[in-house]
Amino acid sequence: MYAMASSHSSSIVSHSNSSKPVYRKGLEPSQQLGLVRSLPDVCPKEPTGDSKSMCDEPSVVADQHKWTIYHSKVNLPAALNDPRLAKRESDFFTKTWGQDFVEMDVLPSPYLLPINKEHLSSYIQQTSLREKNHEKWKSICPPKDDFNRPAFSHGNKPRADLDQVPKIFMKPDFALDDSLTFNAVLPWSHFSSASGKGSRDTASAKLLQEKLSHYLDVVEVNIAHQISLRSEAFFHAMTSQHELQDYLRKTSQAVKMLRDKISQIDRVMCEGSLRILRQAMTRNNCIKVYNKLKLMATVHQTQPTVQLLLSTSEYVGALDLIATTQEVLQQELQGIHSFRHLGSQLCELEKLIDKMIIAEFTSYARSDLNRPLEEDYQVIEEERLVSLVFGLLKQRKLDFFEIYADEMMATAKNIIKQCVVSTVFQIDEIDSELVTKLADQMRMMNFSQWFDLLQNIFSKFTIFLRRVKATINVIRSVVLMVLDKNQRFRETEVMAAQKSLARDGNVDNNLAYLTHEGLFISDAFSEGEHPHAAANTNFQRNASPSSSEPSGSDSVSDPECTTDSSSSKDHTLPSVTPGGIEIIMTEDIKLTDLELGKIANNIQELLYNASDICHDRCVKFLLARAKDGFLEKLNSSEFVSLSRSVEAFVQDTEKICGRKSMSLRGALQSQANKFVNRFHDERKTKLSLLLDNERWKQADVPAEFQDLVDSITDGKIILPERKSGCVEERKPSDFLTVDGQKYAVVGTVLILIRIILEYCSCVDDIPSITTDMLTRLSELLKYFNSRSCQLVLGAGALQVVGLKTITTKNLALSSQCLQLIVHYIPVIRAHFEARMQPKQYSMLRQFDHITKDYNDHIAEISAKLVSIMDSLFEKLLSKYEVKAPVPSMCFRNICKQMAKMHEAIYDLLPEEQTQSLFLRINTSCRRHLKNQLCHLNVINDGGPQHGMVAADIAFYTGNVQALKSLKDLDLNMGEIWEQKR
């Protein structure tokens, strides 16, 4: 029975065709003006032909606008058994009138005053202390369950009894078949079959049986309790079930009638139209089958076509065909039984092509690198190289450059070996039968032969690097073309996606318009497809005129057999390689931009590796020759030529490859350090021998040394070239003229100047040894200064050379030599400074220290000359007496010694130094004379003694000023009469 639940009131309304009263919802006056008709929920049983059935049962046609019980939307038991209410059985109003009746708000009573917290403040103050004590004791002594058990209601007792049953019996997967469950329920550990324990085991079994029986009783009591609680609902549900079955039976009959009607309508109105549509679909399916068979015929010819392409080394075309066929097999021919093995066969064929491409690329690299090294930098068979690179990229063989690197290494070794063999073969002095090893044969060459061999190796490696660069440029250009193609296709896809979105928006608008106008959507689609289909047909007809014929040809280029997946690969981009080879790139090389960029960088790095390989092989060649100290024994010109050749090769490789390779420079630097050590040791030893044999006499200056000094102009040190052939002999000069000033020198200093210039010239030829040469030259200059001081000032030449004494002339000559070196120190410093880095300028301070040491040495020599005359004055004037004759013998001897001193140094020292030196000597003579006059108590009183002293002083002054360049010398002899204060 169905009824409508109401929230306000209900009224009994009699239906015209039924005697059963039904509850109908009461309506307000505003709602009774027009009833809102709703469609029936289900189609009830339609009327049949008899009149009785027309009266008893509702009719869909006649009674569709009348309200019946079938319009009811809510089942009465469902309304009464509302799950949202907690106590629906005991609530009469909810059970009768629905949910909304009990949810009305209760108005507050006007007789009750509002109660707030202030009314309870006195009570709270009285009980606050008790509450605190209660909470304190409650936390210390928590209540036990046993104290509250009597307060439990009888309704909770079954629940408490049920808790005694173990949880294992309540599990949904409880089964005694499980061994663990069985052992948990019946613990066999309590039982034993051993003798003497039978009575105890029997008691345990009885105890277990009683416990299980108790559990069974508890469960049965709980089940009975639950049944007693829900008995009323159970009987109510059974009553409603019979009424529901009657309604379902009537509904089933109505549905059967409706189905019969629909079957008749389908037979009369739909079968013919569906038959036409079915035949059209069959025709389309036949066309698809025909095209599929043509496609299968084309795929069937894949393997012969691939073999034909491989025979002509068309690897890229073969791989494209295999990829297209694989895509067709996976998409359009998937599940074809006859092609079940074709996919695996094509995979094996693709693996074979991989090996063939790698072998072909290896063969190409070997033949390209090992061809004769002539002045030919062109790439051989560029089309073949491009095809191989495309095939390797398509197959994702991204490490193919390692193959090329291995071939480069092997070729570099062969280049050196062939050069050595060809050079040894041309030298008759080397017997290859006695000396079998190439390294030993190479060590038997002299420098000119070995240097020519090195030059030949450098030229071969230069050609080799140019060839490698040309080949790598082609490979890199192919990779960059693929990268550019990927970017272009990505832009094309983005533009196509944007156009597709715009077109889809237009289609949606058209569909909305057609639907609004009442047209069929399928018609709109068919109208939109016809022009496209026509255009597609025209495209196929233009592409291949013979495509309209049946499958009489199994050619792969048949356009009708071209699928959507394969046609997507027809988009191509023309590109041109550096060699002018035009290539057509397809879009099937699926490499990311990151991978392609990495490959391009690796290929560029390959060129750098080629340069490093050449330099490493040259380093090994140099070290093999330097094994017996050959390079250390080279003279400066030979080593300079070697250094220039190596530096030229290094610069050539830097221009070709664009990056510096430091291995060969490092090896040359190592040999240069050894050369510098030997170079310095030889010259230091030579200087030491010259100093040990130097007699410190003025030497003649040959013309070549004067030319050597004249070559140093404007602070630039340039060694003059030695003139060969007939050269006019020039007489040596007595002095060395430097910037208009004459220097009297010894032979050792002339050699030292040439050695200094050799150091500077070596720095020009080998810039890498500038700092080492500066240190060695500083050491050499310091050695000359210290050793000359030991020999002259320290009188070491008396024992070393056998001189009888160190004369003033020796001292003056030594001073001139030192001054000449001091004159050239600023020039040497500027020369080194121009060839050093700014961070190395601190090393130039050594020249400042050397200049100071030389000036100190010169000052010591001057002091030594003055001290010689000072001791002479002290000896002579200590015996001076003021008596006749005048001039006295003492002053005669003094003037004689002064003349000898002037004669010894005048030709050696400049006039300024001579005048300065004699002023100091005169000061010493004046001091000693003054002391002696004080000792003799002779004063300028105009007496006879004063007159005789004045006559001696006049004689002394006249003789000194009579010497060359001392005429204007102010002797100031009047100071001898000044008394000490």
Image (tube, grey):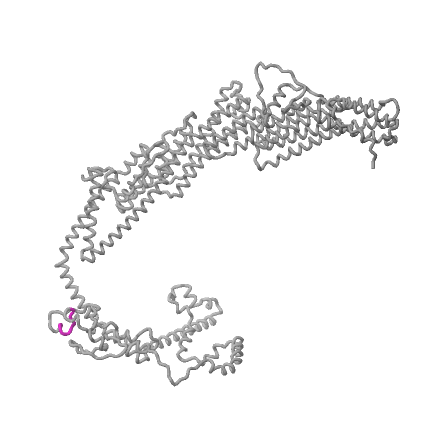
Q: Quadrant of residue 18?
A: bottom left
Q: Is residue 58 magenta?
A: yes
Give the x, y percent position of residue 290: 20, 44
Foreground: 921 or 140? 921
Give the x, y percent position of residue 490: 34, 44
Instruction: Single out the residue that lies furthest toward the front.
Output: 942
Q: Let me know if residue 634 appears in the view.
A: no
Q: Residue at x 20, y 40 (%)?
A: 541
Does residue 536 lie above or below 45 as drawn?
Answer: above
Instruction: Single out the residue that lies furthest toward the left.
Output: 50
Q: Residue at x 49, y 29 (%)?
A: 649
Q: Quadrant of residue 780?
A: top right
Horizontal side, residue 925 vs residue 732: left or right: right
Where are the magenta residues, as a range? 53-60
Q: Let me know if residue 357 appears in the view.
A: yes
Quadrant including the N terminus: bottom left
